[in-house]
Amino acid sequence: MKIILAPDSFKGSLTSDEFIKIASDVIKEKLPAAEIVPFWMADGGEGSLQALSHELPLKFYSLKVKNPLGRRSNASFAMDKENAYVEMASASGLLKMRKNKPQGFISTSYGTGELIKAALDRGAKTIYLCLGGSGTVDGGSGAMKALGAYFKDSAGHQVLGSAKNLSRIATIDLNNFDSRIKDVHFISLADVINPLCGDNGAVKVFGPQKGLSPEQLEIVEKGMEHYAEVLKKTFHVDLQSLVSGGAAGGMGTALSLFCSAEVTSGADMILKLGHFEEKCQNADYIFTGEGKLDASSFQGKAISRLVEFGQKHHVRTVAFVGTVENITPEENGLYRIIALKRPEMTTDYSIKHAKTLLEKAIEKFILEVKKD
Protein backbone atom coordinates (compact mmCIF):
# COMPACT_ATOMS: atom_id res chain seq x y z
CA MET A 1 0.00 0.00 0.00
CA LYS A 2 1.23 3.50 -0.91
CA ILE A 3 0.06 6.48 1.14
CA ILE A 4 0.91 10.09 0.29
CA LEU A 5 0.97 12.49 3.24
CA ALA A 6 0.19 16.00 1.93
CA PRO A 7 -1.12 18.21 4.73
CA ASP A 8 -1.41 21.97 4.96
CA SER A 9 -0.79 23.49 8.39
CA PHE A 10 -3.46 23.66 11.10
CA LYS A 11 -3.01 27.30 12.06
CA GLY A 12 -2.29 27.62 15.77
CA SER A 13 -2.14 23.91 16.52
CA LEU A 14 -0.30 21.63 14.08
CA THR A 15 2.43 22.24 11.53
CA SER A 16 2.80 20.18 8.37
CA ASP A 17 5.93 18.62 9.85
CA GLU A 18 4.04 17.50 12.93
CA PHE A 19 1.19 16.04 10.86
CA ILE A 20 3.62 14.09 8.69
CA LYS A 21 5.57 12.73 11.66
CA ILE A 22 2.43 11.66 13.54
CA ALA A 23 0.91 10.03 10.47
CA SER A 24 4.18 8.31 9.54
CA ASP A 25 4.63 6.87 13.03
CA VAL A 26 1.09 5.46 13.09
CA ILE A 27 1.34 3.97 9.60
CA LYS A 28 4.73 2.39 10.30
CA GLU A 29 3.33 0.76 13.43
CA LYS A 30 0.01 -0.42 11.98
CA LEU A 31 1.01 -0.99 8.34
CA PRO A 32 4.76 -1.69 8.41
CA ALA A 33 4.84 -2.75 4.74
CA ALA A 34 3.23 0.48 3.51
CA GLU A 35 5.16 2.95 1.37
CA ILE A 36 4.94 6.45 2.86
CA VAL A 37 5.47 9.46 0.59
CA PRO A 38 5.59 12.82 2.41
CA PHE A 39 4.69 16.02 0.57
CA TRP A 40 4.65 19.41 2.28
CA MET A 41 1.60 21.20 0.91
CA ALA A 42 0.92 24.95 0.76
CA ASP A 43 -1.13 27.30 -1.37
CA GLY A 44 1.03 30.39 -1.65
CA GLY A 45 0.50 31.61 1.91
CA GLU A 46 2.75 31.51 4.95
CA GLY A 47 4.72 28.27 5.09
CA SER A 48 5.07 28.02 1.31
CA LEU A 49 8.84 28.44 1.30
CA GLN A 50 9.20 25.90 4.07
CA ALA A 51 7.11 23.48 2.03
CA LEU A 52 9.17 24.09 -1.11
CA SER A 53 12.42 23.62 0.80
CA HIS A 54 11.59 19.92 1.14
CA GLU A 55 11.35 19.57 -2.65
CA LEU A 56 13.92 22.10 -3.96
CA PRO A 57 17.54 22.84 -2.96
CA LEU A 58 16.71 26.29 -1.61
CA LYS A 59 19.22 28.61 -0.01
CA PHE A 60 17.69 31.11 2.42
CA TYR A 61 18.79 34.72 2.87
CA SER A 62 17.77 36.86 5.84
CA LEU A 63 17.73 40.64 6.09
CA LYS A 64 16.14 43.50 7.97
CA VAL A 65 13.17 45.09 6.20
CA LYS A 66 10.28 47.31 7.19
CA ASN A 67 7.45 45.34 8.77
CA PRO A 68 3.84 46.40 8.05
CA LEU A 69 4.07 49.16 10.66
CA GLY A 70 7.36 50.52 9.34
CA ARG A 71 9.69 49.07 11.97
CA ARG A 72 12.81 47.13 10.99
CA SER A 73 12.25 43.41 11.34
CA ASN A 74 13.81 40.15 10.19
CA ALA A 75 12.49 38.62 6.96
CA SER A 76 13.83 36.12 4.46
CA PHE A 77 13.60 34.89 0.89
CA ALA A 78 15.06 31.85 -0.83
CA MET A 79 16.87 31.08 -4.06
CA ASP A 80 17.58 28.07 -6.25
CA LYS A 81 20.11 29.10 -8.90
CA GLU A 82 18.49 32.12 -10.64
CA ASN A 83 15.01 31.46 -9.23
CA ALA A 84 13.97 33.49 -6.19
CA TYR A 85 11.05 32.73 -3.87
CA VAL A 86 9.56 35.56 -1.84
CA GLU A 87 6.86 35.01 0.77
CA MET A 88 4.91 38.20 1.40
CA ALA A 89 3.95 36.99 4.87
CA SER A 90 7.63 37.02 5.86
CA ALA A 91 7.88 40.80 5.48
CA SER A 92 4.33 42.14 5.36
CA GLY A 93 2.23 39.44 7.01
CA LEU A 94 -0.49 39.59 9.61
CA LEU A 95 1.81 37.86 12.06
CA LYS A 96 4.40 40.64 11.74
CA MET A 97 2.11 43.08 13.58
CA ARG A 98 2.72 43.93 17.22
CA LYS A 99 0.98 41.31 19.35
CA ASN A 100 -0.46 39.92 16.09
CA LYS A 101 -3.05 42.72 16.05
CA PRO A 102 -3.88 43.63 12.43
CA GLN A 103 -3.73 47.32 11.55
CA GLY A 104 -4.59 47.31 7.87
CA PHE A 105 -5.48 51.00 7.75
CA ILE A 106 -1.87 52.13 8.30
CA SER A 107 0.15 49.03 7.33
CA THR A 108 2.48 49.00 4.33
CA SER A 109 3.83 46.35 1.96
CA TYR A 110 7.16 48.22 1.69
CA GLY A 111 9.12 45.34 3.23
CA THR A 112 8.00 42.96 0.49
CA GLY A 113 9.46 45.35 -2.06
CA GLU A 114 12.72 45.29 -0.12
CA LEU A 115 12.77 41.49 -0.35
CA ILE A 116 12.19 41.69 -4.11
CA LYS A 117 15.04 44.19 -4.41
CA ALA A 118 17.33 41.89 -2.41
CA ALA A 119 16.45 39.01 -4.76
CA LEU A 120 17.30 41.22 -7.74
CA ASP A 121 20.61 42.08 -6.09
CA ARG A 122 21.31 38.34 -5.88
CA GLY A 123 20.81 38.01 -9.65
CA ALA A 124 17.30 36.53 -9.73
CA LYS A 125 15.87 36.07 -13.22
CA THR A 126 12.58 34.52 -12.13
CA ILE A 127 10.84 35.62 -8.92
CA TYR A 128 7.95 33.67 -7.40
CA LEU A 129 5.82 35.81 -5.09
CA CYS A 130 3.76 33.91 -2.50
CA LEU A 131 0.91 36.33 -1.72
CA GLY A 132 -1.04 34.63 1.07
CA GLY A 133 -1.05 35.76 4.69
CA SER A 134 -0.52 39.46 4.02
CA GLY A 135 -1.50 42.10 6.57
CA THR A 136 -1.82 45.00 4.14
CA VAL A 137 -4.48 46.65 1.97
CA ASP A 138 -2.29 49.25 0.26
CA GLY A 139 -2.74 48.04 -3.31
CA GLY A 140 0.92 47.07 -3.37
CA SER A 141 1.89 50.75 -3.33
CA GLY A 142 4.35 50.25 -0.47
CA ALA A 143 6.22 47.46 -2.26
CA MET A 144 6.36 49.37 -5.53
CA LYS A 145 7.66 52.45 -3.70
CA ALA A 146 10.50 50.31 -2.32
CA LEU A 147 11.32 49.41 -5.93
CA GLY A 148 11.53 53.04 -7.01
CA ALA A 149 8.00 54.08 -7.97
CA TYR A 150 7.01 57.54 -6.73
CA PHE A 151 3.40 57.98 -5.68
CA LYS A 152 2.65 61.70 -5.59
CA ASP A 153 -0.24 63.79 -4.31
CA SER A 154 -1.77 66.74 -6.18
CA ALA A 155 1.00 69.03 -4.86
CA GLY A 156 3.73 66.71 -6.14
CA HIS A 157 4.75 65.42 -2.72
CA GLN A 158 5.51 61.72 -2.25
CA VAL A 159 2.81 59.65 -0.55
CA LEU A 160 3.70 56.77 1.76
CA GLY A 161 2.21 53.42 0.77
CA SER A 162 -0.73 52.51 3.01
CA ALA A 163 -4.48 51.98 2.76
CA LYS A 164 -4.99 55.28 4.54
CA ASN A 165 -3.15 57.19 1.81
CA LEU A 166 -4.63 55.61 -1.33
CA SER A 167 -7.07 58.49 -1.85
CA ARG A 168 -4.18 61.00 -1.85
CA ILE A 169 -2.36 59.48 -4.83
CA ALA A 170 -2.69 61.73 -7.88
CA THR A 171 0.12 60.52 -10.14
CA ILE A 172 2.67 57.71 -10.36
CA ASP A 173 6.22 58.53 -11.45
CA LEU A 174 8.15 55.52 -12.81
CA ASN A 175 11.32 57.33 -13.87
CA ASN A 176 13.29 55.81 -10.98
CA PHE A 177 11.58 52.40 -10.99
CA ASP A 178 14.16 49.59 -10.81
CA SER A 179 15.25 49.03 -14.41
CA ARG A 180 16.16 45.37 -13.77
CA ILE A 181 12.51 44.43 -13.34
CA LYS A 182 11.75 44.53 -17.07
CA ASP A 183 14.19 41.64 -17.62
CA VAL A 184 12.84 39.44 -14.82
CA HIS A 185 9.95 36.96 -15.01
CA PHE A 186 7.60 37.50 -12.06
CA ILE A 187 5.07 34.84 -11.05
CA SER A 188 2.40 35.68 -8.49
CA LEU A 189 1.18 32.67 -6.48
CA ALA A 190 -2.34 33.44 -5.27
CA ASP A 191 -5.09 31.35 -3.72
CA VAL A 192 -7.90 33.84 -4.41
CA ILE A 193 -9.37 35.26 -7.61
CA ASN A 194 -10.96 38.41 -6.16
CA PRO A 195 -10.71 41.69 -8.13
CA LEU A 196 -9.20 44.86 -6.75
CA CYS A 197 -12.44 46.73 -6.04
CA GLY A 198 -16.12 46.08 -5.44
CA ASP A 199 -18.22 43.87 -3.20
CA ASN A 200 -15.94 40.91 -3.91
CA GLY A 201 -12.77 42.97 -3.90
CA ALA A 202 -9.65 43.25 -1.75
CA VAL A 203 -11.10 45.70 0.77
CA LYS A 204 -14.62 44.46 1.44
CA VAL A 205 -13.73 40.76 1.50
CA PHE A 206 -10.36 40.80 3.26
CA GLY A 207 -10.31 44.19 4.99
CA PRO A 208 -12.05 43.03 8.19
CA GLN A 209 -9.50 40.28 8.86
CA LYS A 210 -6.76 42.87 8.40
CA GLY A 211 -8.21 45.09 11.09
CA LEU A 212 -10.31 47.59 9.13
CA SER A 213 -13.31 48.90 11.08
CA PRO A 214 -16.66 49.38 9.28
CA GLU A 215 -15.89 53.10 8.93
CA GLN A 216 -12.39 52.39 7.62
CA LEU A 217 -13.76 49.86 5.12
CA GLU A 218 -15.75 52.60 3.43
CA ILE A 219 -12.81 55.01 3.44
CA VAL A 220 -10.37 52.45 2.05
CA GLU A 221 -12.79 51.15 -0.59
CA LYS A 222 -13.21 54.69 -1.92
CA GLY A 223 -9.44 55.13 -1.76
CA MET A 224 -8.90 51.87 -3.66
CA GLU A 225 -11.37 52.93 -6.35
CA HIS A 226 -9.48 56.22 -6.70
CA TYR A 227 -6.14 54.36 -6.82
CA ALA A 228 -7.57 52.07 -9.50
CA GLU A 229 -8.38 55.07 -11.65
CA VAL A 230 -4.83 56.40 -11.29
CA LEU A 231 -3.45 52.96 -12.23
CA LYS A 232 -5.76 52.81 -15.24
CA LYS A 233 -4.51 56.20 -16.49
CA THR A 234 -0.89 55.21 -15.87
CA PHE A 235 -0.90 51.74 -17.43
CA HIS A 236 -3.91 51.95 -19.78
CA VAL A 237 -5.28 48.61 -18.58
CA ASP A 238 -8.79 47.45 -17.66
CA LEU A 239 -8.26 46.42 -14.04
CA GLN A 240 -11.38 44.26 -13.94
CA SER A 241 -9.66 41.88 -16.36
CA LEU A 242 -6.76 41.24 -13.98
CA VAL A 243 -6.97 37.77 -12.44
CA SER A 244 -6.44 37.80 -8.65
CA GLY A 245 -6.00 41.58 -8.67
CA GLY A 246 -7.37 41.74 -5.14
CA ALA A 247 -4.96 39.15 -3.76
CA ALA A 248 -2.86 40.34 -0.79
CA GLY A 249 -4.71 43.63 -0.43
CA GLY A 250 -4.17 44.55 -4.07
CA MET A 251 -0.58 43.36 -4.37
CA GLY A 252 -1.80 41.09 -7.17
CA THR A 253 -2.73 44.15 -9.22
CA ALA A 254 0.55 45.96 -8.50
CA LEU A 255 2.69 42.99 -9.55
CA SER A 256 0.69 42.51 -12.75
CA LEU A 257 0.99 46.16 -13.78
CA PHE A 258 4.39 47.28 -12.48
CA CYS A 259 6.22 43.95 -12.94
CA SER A 260 4.18 42.28 -15.74
CA ALA A 261 3.70 39.32 -13.41
CA GLU A 262 2.11 36.09 -14.53
CA VAL A 263 -0.61 34.95 -12.11
CA THR A 264 -1.16 31.32 -11.16
CA SER A 265 -2.66 29.26 -8.38
CA GLY A 266 -0.26 28.93 -5.48
CA ALA A 267 -1.36 25.38 -4.82
CA ASP A 268 -0.94 24.44 -8.49
CA MET A 269 2.57 25.84 -8.69
CA ILE A 270 3.74 24.16 -5.49
CA LEU A 271 2.32 20.84 -6.69
CA LYS A 272 4.11 21.34 -10.01
CA LEU A 273 7.44 22.36 -8.48
CA GLY A 274 7.26 19.38 -6.13
CA HIS A 275 6.36 16.89 -8.92
CA PHE A 276 3.26 15.81 -7.01
CA GLU A 277 1.56 14.16 -9.98
CA GLU A 278 4.48 11.78 -10.40
CA LYS A 279 4.19 10.84 -6.74
CA CYS A 280 0.52 9.96 -7.25
CA GLN A 281 1.43 7.09 -9.54
CA ASN A 282 0.21 3.79 -8.04
CA ALA A 283 -0.81 5.43 -4.77
CA ASP A 284 -3.75 4.12 -2.75
CA TYR A 285 -4.48 7.05 -0.46
CA ILE A 286 -3.72 10.74 -0.04
CA PHE A 287 -3.89 11.87 3.58
CA THR A 288 -4.33 15.62 3.79
CA GLY A 289 -5.47 18.03 6.45
CA GLU A 290 -6.07 21.60 7.52
CA GLY A 291 -7.56 23.43 10.47
CA LYS A 292 -10.99 24.15 9.03
CA LEU A 293 -12.78 22.60 6.07
CA ASP A 294 -15.60 24.63 4.53
CA ALA A 295 -16.82 25.78 1.13
CA SER A 296 -13.87 28.16 0.69
CA SER A 297 -11.49 25.19 0.93
CA PHE A 298 -12.65 24.10 -2.52
CA GLN A 299 -12.26 27.47 -4.24
CA GLY A 300 -8.82 26.88 -5.73
CA LYS A 301 -7.06 26.15 -2.45
CA ALA A 302 -4.67 23.32 -1.70
CA ILE A 303 -7.12 20.61 -0.75
CA SER A 304 -9.22 21.07 -3.90
CA ARG A 305 -6.13 20.51 -6.06
CA LEU A 306 -5.21 17.37 -4.14
CA VAL A 307 -8.70 15.98 -4.72
CA GLU A 308 -8.41 16.67 -8.45
CA PHE A 309 -5.11 14.80 -8.69
CA GLY A 310 -6.55 11.99 -6.62
CA GLN A 311 -9.54 11.60 -8.90
CA LYS A 312 -7.35 11.75 -12.00
CA HIS A 313 -5.13 8.92 -10.73
CA HIS A 314 -7.86 6.98 -8.89
CA VAL A 315 -6.36 7.72 -5.49
CA ARG A 316 -8.68 8.08 -2.49
CA THR A 317 -8.23 11.38 -0.64
CA VAL A 318 -8.88 11.44 3.10
CA ALA A 319 -9.07 14.80 4.89
CA PHE A 320 -8.21 14.98 8.59
CA VAL A 321 -9.40 18.41 9.70
CA GLY A 322 -9.86 20.38 12.89
CA THR A 323 -13.47 21.27 12.13
CA VAL A 324 -15.83 20.88 9.18
CA GLU A 325 -18.72 23.13 8.16
CA ASN A 326 -21.51 22.14 5.78
CA ILE A 327 -19.32 19.89 3.65
CA THR A 328 -19.87 16.27 2.67
CA PRO A 329 -17.14 14.13 1.10
CA GLU A 330 -19.30 12.96 -1.80
CA GLU A 331 -20.03 16.43 -3.19
CA ASN A 332 -16.36 17.42 -3.16
CA GLY A 333 -14.64 14.27 -4.35
CA LEU A 334 -13.21 13.24 -0.99
CA TYR A 335 -13.19 9.64 0.13
CA ARG A 336 -13.58 10.58 3.80
CA ILE A 337 -13.66 13.66 6.02
CA ILE A 338 -12.54 13.03 9.59
CA ALA A 339 -12.97 15.91 12.05
CA LEU A 340 -10.66 15.97 15.07
CA LYS A 341 -12.97 18.20 17.11
CA ARG A 342 -16.00 16.31 18.34
CA PRO A 343 -19.24 18.11 19.32
CA GLU A 344 -18.62 17.77 23.05
CA MET A 345 -15.16 19.40 22.82
CA THR A 346 -14.35 23.08 23.17
CA THR A 347 -12.21 24.69 20.49
CA ASP A 348 -9.46 25.38 23.02
CA TYR A 349 -9.40 21.74 24.05
CA SER A 350 -9.20 20.47 20.47
CA ILE A 351 -6.36 22.87 19.65
CA LYS A 352 -4.42 21.97 22.79
CA HIS A 353 -4.79 18.23 22.17
CA ALA A 354 -4.56 18.32 18.38
CA LYS A 355 -1.59 15.97 18.19
CA THR A 356 -3.25 13.27 20.25
CA LEU A 357 -6.56 13.67 18.42
CA LEU A 358 -4.84 13.36 15.04
CA GLU A 359 -2.90 10.28 16.13
CA LYS A 360 -6.08 8.54 17.30
CA ALA A 361 -8.02 9.52 14.18
CA ILE A 362 -5.36 8.17 11.82
CA GLU A 363 -4.97 5.00 13.87
CA LYS A 364 -8.73 4.40 13.76
CA PHE A 365 -8.83 4.91 9.99
CA ILE A 366 -5.85 2.61 9.40
CA LEU A 367 -7.51 -0.15 11.43
CA GLU A 368 -10.62 0.23 9.27
CA VAL A 369 -8.47 -0.07 6.14
CA LYS A 370 -6.84 -3.23 7.47
CA LYS A 371 -10.24 -4.83 8.03
CA ASP A 372 -11.18 -4.17 4.43
Image (spheres, rainbow, N blue to C red):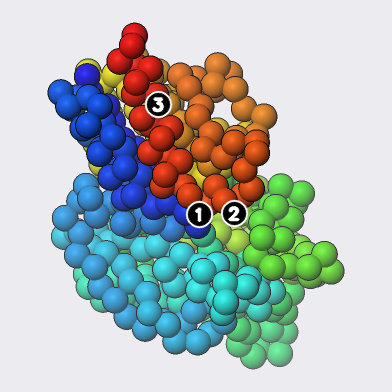
Task: Indicate left or right for 346 with 20 as reference.
Answer: right
User: Which residue position holds label 1?
Assistant: 352
User: Which residue position holds label 2?
Assistant: 348
Query: 179 above or below 154?
Result: above
Q: Looking at the picture, tell me which residue is in the foreground, 301 or 254.
A: 301
Q: Residue placed at 55% from the left, 16% from the top?
A: 330
Q: CA distance from mark 1 to mark 3?
A: 20 Å
At label 1, the amino acid type is: Lys
Q: For the residue labelled by badge 3, is the local secondary structure a helix, a strand or a loop?
A: helix
Query: 85 above or below 270?
Result: below
Label 1 neighbourhood size at 10 Å, few (<14), some (14-19), many (20+)?
Answer: few
Q: Residue placed at 66% from the left, 60% from the top?
A: 209
Q: Is residue 299 something one can see in this rendering?
A: no
Q: Position of residue 69 (x, y in %)?
A: 57, 82
Which mark, residue 364? Answer: 3
Is the Cβ of the residue at disc 1 closer than 8 Å to that at disc 2? yes
At label 2, the amino acid type is: Asp
Q: Is residue 12 something one can see in this rendering?
A: yes
Q: CA distance from mark 2 to mark 3?
A: 23 Å
Residue 135 sits in quarter: bottom right
At label 3, the amino acid type is: Lys
Q: Position of residue 287 (x, y in %)?
A: 37, 31
Query: 78 above or below 341?
Result: below
Sequence-wise, the earlier of marks 1 and 3 is 1
